[in-house]
Image: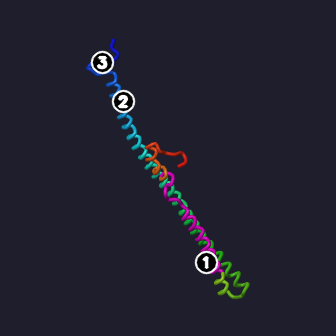
Amino acid sequence: MNNDPAPFPGGASRTGTASAQTQDNIVDLVRQLTSQGSHLAEQQLQLILAEVRETTNDLKVAVAGMLGAAVVGIAGLGVVLMGLAYLLGDAIENLGLATLIVGVVTLVVAAILYAGARKKMNAAHLSPERSRRTLERTPDAVRGELTPGA
């Protein structure tokens, strides 16, 4: 009795067919990996665009709110400052000096408010940090070198 694998029609043996199937499976796996990698890159790009869009929309809303508040605030502040200057002028009996004092105090307050607003504008994150980190880690993940804490 012969222990060799029985030949298949066309002269192929079982081991030859298994080898061809393994090669086909590897080719299919590489094709799937390439397709999934491309799909992942497209999704990352869409995520970056969405994050940038969201951040710029938030910034637009904040700036519009600040401008609206500034317009209304300037009108009201003018009336209040005029009233304060007249009251202080009556109290010290020198309207010119009172107006100067109110103006200087107002400029100091405005400088403080401006510094606070500038800090908030500098703190706005315009770069999509999470997406950038994910993109940096993607090549490592494809190679199987991704560590959980990185």
Residue 7 marker: 3
Q: Residue at x 53, y 63 (%)?
A: 63
- Magenta range is 102-131
> For the view shown, which residue lies furthest in the top direction?
1
Looking at numbered disc 2 in the image, what kind of residue is underneath it? Thr
**Secondary structure under badge 3?**
loop
Total marks in image = 3
Name the spot of residue 92 as percent of width and height, x first. 72, 86
Looking at numbered disc 3 in the image, what kind of residue is underneath it? Pro
Q: Residue at x 31, y 21 (%)?
A: 13
Looking at numbered disc 1 in the image, what kind of residue is underneath it? Leu
> For the view shown, which residue lies furthest in the right direction?
91
**Distance of label 1 from label 2 (alpha carbons):** 79 Å
Q: Viewed as shown, does residue 17 lie left or right of 102?
A: left
Lower sequence index among marks 1 and 2 = 2
Instruction: Choose top left, top right, bottom left or bottom right for residue 109.
Output: bottom right
Q: Viewed as shown, does residue 104 lie left or right of 16?
A: right
Q: Is residue 3 above or below residue 125?
A: above
Front residue of 81/40: it is 40
Lower sequence index among marks 3 and 2 = 3
The residue that mark 1 highlights is: 107
**Distance of label 1 from label 3 (alpha carbons):** 98 Å
Instruction: Choose top left, top right, bottom left or bottom right for residue 65.
Output: bottom right
Q: Count residues near mark 2 (Cα–Cα under 10 Å), then give few for <14, some for 14-19, many for 20+.
A: few
**Distance of label 3 from label 2 (alpha carbons):** 19 Å
Residue 22 marker: 2
Q: Viewed as shown, does residue 75 lie left or right of 56?
A: right
Q: Residue at x 30, y 18 (%)?
A: 7
